[in-house]
Structures are given as structure tokens and as C-alpha cells.
């Protein structure tokens, strides 16, 4: 499905509702404070916003702190997902810094039938623009709108993995951390059932939930401008003023390292949060041993992607041969 991107201009008199979803645990809660601050401080007052925080065993302090972001046109809701995921928790394989929260976005269409469209955002982001601009991208009948994955596009090993193992022709593989979700369309295809059906048939280990989402939404994606999901790679030449959203994933984390590109955007918003000192402490306590573990993690991930790409029995080959049949 090839679709033209159309940005509707906000109506100053509109009172439209924009649902925004996050998934978080206590480990990522400090980053969510920064993301929320960056949204609330720049959001158009022409809209109302429902911010839904999906969590598991989130501390009372973090819950109370997030609720304080509620104001006249912002409502914040916190939903504990422990009971919801109990029956499928064993399927939710994780590794390294991943937790089960990464799968919570799969439940959004069925849990929130009152919304036909919503935003899903990872916690490790900072907005440099009005979030309503992102919501106002028209994605038609596509399942999601997203930005092509910069890490996959620019890292040869990940490129080979996406093409050889998963069967994608780049740049048609999106990063799942910033999504415009067509909830109405996803409900029509029984999205969550399809997602877990694939999980029962094959275990994706490199990008996990992101791989599943790309497979499920293949050919039903509107690709958005790259300015809406920019990874701060050191070799990037884009100016911060030209970017809408910075995604501090992989090893590009200003709360750990000095000199992260576009780190000033993160700290500008972090200073206005109640966790600013906590973030500074996290950075001060990050040791050389921690940095070595980060480097080893990246090496392991690249090796895993390379091994998967070189397999004869790839997911894509099994799909073509009928060894794996996706739920219709």
C-alpha cells in the first residue's frame, strides 16, 4: 500500500481529543517524565489530550508524579497491565534491557474501543514540536504510520537481517517506538490475536516486538518524515531545529554518556521535571564497567542479527514455503 502523506492543519477552534499511549516500568519512569514534559510544554491548546500510561507494578511515587501532569486540556490515566498479560506472559520473551512493557502496545486496540486513532510513543524520546502535528498525519486505511528504522537503514548487519531473515525490501521496515495507530483498522483484523499467533509460531530475537509489528503491518504502513523519529547517531548532519522528535535509543543515551548528539534537547526538558537530580545521579553513577557492558550488548546484538541473516531456514523462507502460515 503506497500512500501520500497529508498533514491536516489544526483548526484553532477545534476541541479534538488526541489519545497518547506509553508503556513503562520503574526503570524507565525517569525518562517518561522527560517525554511528558516535552509534550505538555509544546502541545497545542486547540486539542484535548488523554495520556494513557500502561505499566506493571509502577511505584506509588511515580504514579502520583505522572498524574500531576494533568491539567485543563491534559488527562493522565494509569493502567496496570499485570492481570491483562497474565495468560500470555510466558510468550513475551525478553532480553537485555527489554521488559514485558514493550508488548503492552499490542493490547491498545482491544482495550480502548472508544478510540479509532492514537499515538504510541516510547519513553526514551523528547519532542521538539507540537505533538498534535504527529497525530494529524492522515494514514487512511493503513494500520500504522511510522518512520523507517534508521538503525536498520544505516547498519549493514541490521539491513541484511531485515532483508534476508524477515523478507523486507528497505526502506520499508519501521521503528516501532513512534507510531500513529489506526485502532479501528487494527481491531478489524483482530490485531492482538494475530500478534500472539505469530509469537506462538516463531521467536524473533533481534528486535522482538518490533519485528512482529513489522511483519503484521507489512504493506499497510504510511511512512512519515524522518524528522519524527530521529536517532542521534554521531554521524548525523541534521540540525536539531529541523527535527520534530529525537529517539534516544540503542547506546545514544544522554542520561548515561557525555556528548550525545541532540542531548541538549533532553536536558532542557529534564531540568523542568521532578526527576532531574535522579537523572544526574544516574549519569554520575554510570561506570566504565557499565559502558563496557553496553558495548558488549551491541556486539552480541550484531552477531545475533548476522547469524539469523545467514541461516538457510529464515522466517521469510518458511513463510514462502508454507512452513509458517500467518493467521488470516
Image: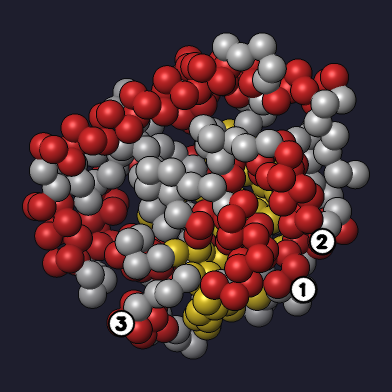
Q: Secondary structure at mark 2?
A: helix
Q: Answer whether residue 246 is visible to the viewer in this image.
A: no
Which residue position is annotated with label 1? Answer: 113
Q: Secondary structure at mark 3?
A: helix
Q: Is residue 175 left or right of residue 24?
A: right
Image: 176 above or below 9: above
Dot 3 alpha-carbon crowd within 10 angstroms: few under 14, some 14 to 19, many 20 or more: few
Q: Nearer the viewer, mark 1 or mark 3?
A: 3
Q: Is residue 278 left or right of residue 235?
A: left
The percent position of residue 245, horizontal first and vertical second, equals: 44, 49
Which residue position is annotated with label 2? Answer: 187
Q: Answer whether residue 71 is visible to the viewer in this image.
A: yes
The percent position of residue 267, horizontal first and vertical second, equals: 23, 56
Picture residue at 60% right of the left edge, 23% below the top: 162
Image-quadrant location for residue 277: bottom left
Q: Earlier in the sequence, mark 1 or mark 3?
A: 3
Which residue position is annotated with label 3? Answer: 61
Measure the alpha-carbon separation of dots 1 and 3.
29 Å
Picture residue at 62% right of the left edge, 52% below the top: 91
Q: Are marks 2 and 1 in contact (CB under 8 Å)?
A: yes
Measure the alpha-carbon separation of dots 2 and 1.
8 Å
Q: Earlier in the sequence, mark 3 or mark 2?
A: 3
Picture residue at 19% right of the left edge, 32% below the top: 292
Image-quadrant location for residue 327: top right
Amino acid at each position: 500500500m503506497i500512500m501520500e502523506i497529508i498533514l491536516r492543519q489544526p483548526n484553532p477552534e477545534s476541541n479534538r481529543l488526541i489519545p497518547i499511549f506509553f508503556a513503562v516500568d520503574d526503570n524507565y519512569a525517569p525518562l517518561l517524565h522527560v517525554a511528558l514534559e516535552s509534550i505538555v510544554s509544546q502541545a497545542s491548546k486547540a486539542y484535548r489530550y488523554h495520556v494513557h500510561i500502561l505499566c506493571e507494578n509502577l511505584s506509588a511515587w511515580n504514579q502520583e508524579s505522572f498524574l500531576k501532569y494533568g491539567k485543563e486540556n491534559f488527562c493522565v490515566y494509569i493502567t496496570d497491565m499485570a492481570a491483562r498479560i497474565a495468560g500470555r506472559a510466558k510468550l513475551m520473551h525478553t532480553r537485555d534491557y527489554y521488559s514485558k512493557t514493550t508488548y503492552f502496545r499490542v493490547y491498545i486496540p482491544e482495550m480502548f474501543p472508544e478510540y479509532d486513532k492514537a499515538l504510541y510513543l516510547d519513553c526514551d524520546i523528547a519532542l521538539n514540536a507540537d505533538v498534535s502535528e504527529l497525530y494529524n498525519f492522515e494514514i487512511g486505511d493503513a494500520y500504522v504510520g511510522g518512520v523507517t528504522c534508521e538503525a536498520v537503514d544505516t547498519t549493514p548487519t541490521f539491513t541484511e537481517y531485515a532483508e534476508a531473515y524477515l523478507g523486507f525490501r528497505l526502506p520499508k521496515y519501521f521503528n516501532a517506538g513512534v507510531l500513529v495507530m489506526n485502532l479501528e483498522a487494527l481491531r478489524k483484523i483482530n490485531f492482538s490475536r494475530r500478534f500472539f499467533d505469530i509469537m506462538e509460531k516463531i521467536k524473533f530475537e533481534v528486535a522482538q516486538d518490533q519485528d512482529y509489528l513489522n511483519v503484521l503491518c507489512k504493506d499497510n504502513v504510511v511512512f512519515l518524515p524522518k524528522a519524527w523519529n530521529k536517532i542521534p547517531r554521531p554521524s548525523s548532519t541534521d540540525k536539531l531545529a529541523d527535527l520534530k522528535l529525537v529517539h534516544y535509543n540503542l547506546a545514544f543515551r544522554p542520561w548515561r554518556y557525555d556528548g550525545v548528539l541532540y542531548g541538549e534537547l533532553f536536558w532542557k526538558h529534564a531540568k523542568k521535571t521532578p526527576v532531574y537530580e535522579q537523572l544526574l545521579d544516574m549519569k554520575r553513577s554510570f561506570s566504565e564497567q557499565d559502558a563496557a557492558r553496553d558495548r558488549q550488548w551491541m556486539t552480541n546484538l550484531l552477531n545475533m542479527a548476522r547469524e539469523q541473516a545467514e541461516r538457510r531456514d529464515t522466517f521469510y523462507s518458511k513463510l514462502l514455503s508454507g512452513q509458517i502460515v500467518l493467521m488470516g
